[in-house]
Amino acid sequence: LSDNDGWLAAWVWLDTLTGGTFPTIAGKTSSTIGNHEYGLQLTGSTGTISFFTGGATQRTATSVTTIATGAWRFVIGYHDAVNDLVGVSIDGGAFVTGATSGTAPPDSASAFRIGARGPTPDRYWPGRIDAVMFGKSPPGGIAGVITSIRDALWAGGAGLSL
């Protein structure tokens, strides 16, 4: 994403909330914090999901809705470079947003990973991941389209058939 508008979404199933250091659903991440670009992750054992943009100082939006174990959940996060925001939504709910510092996330050389933030098992996603989706915003910015993207992909809980 670097300093561009974009979004990342997935359907996830959480087996457990125990253990792990920020288990990651997907993103361009690294085991070194300064090398993260963006991602969706579980925040500790609280069951909250955050979308972050990286660099040495992460700028995150953390959901206020926790996800439970044993059920499929739809999560989507986005970066709005024009308005310096990140946001996250679970199961088609309202986006919870957070302001970025206004400093562009790095265009890192980190790998795009699904199910892990880095090579250590404590950062593996403790469950299942399906239908990971990524997109960049059309001209005019993401603010005007992210709700429509979320609604189309969520499709009332049925998911968009691709």
Image (tube, rainbow, N blue to C red):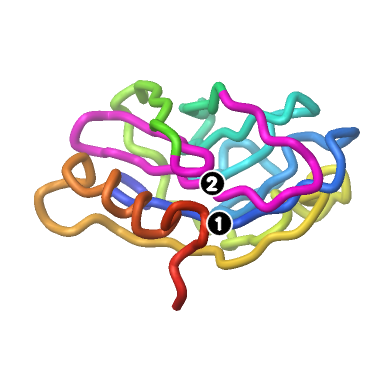
From this viewpoint, is residue 133 visible?
yes
Q: Is residue 4 above or below residue 42?
A: below
- Residue 144 appears at what percent x and percent y? 16, 43
Toward the bottom, the furthest residue is 162
- Residue 109 appears at what percent x and percent y? 52, 58
Circle 1 residue: 10
Residues in magenta, as a range: 65-92
- Residue 29 appears at what percent x and percent y? 60, 50
Circle 2 residue: 75
From the viewer's perspective, tell me whether residue 14 is left or right of residue 25: right
From the viewer's perspective, tell me whether residue 94 is left or right of residue 25: left
From the viewer's perspective, tell me whether residue 146 is left or right of residue 14: left
- Residue 40 appears at what percent x and percent y? 57, 44
Asked which quadrant contains residue 23, the reply is top right
Toward the left, the furthest residue is 140
Q: Are marks 2 and 1 in contact (CB under 8 Å)?
A: yes
Residue drawn at (65%, 61%) of the image: 114
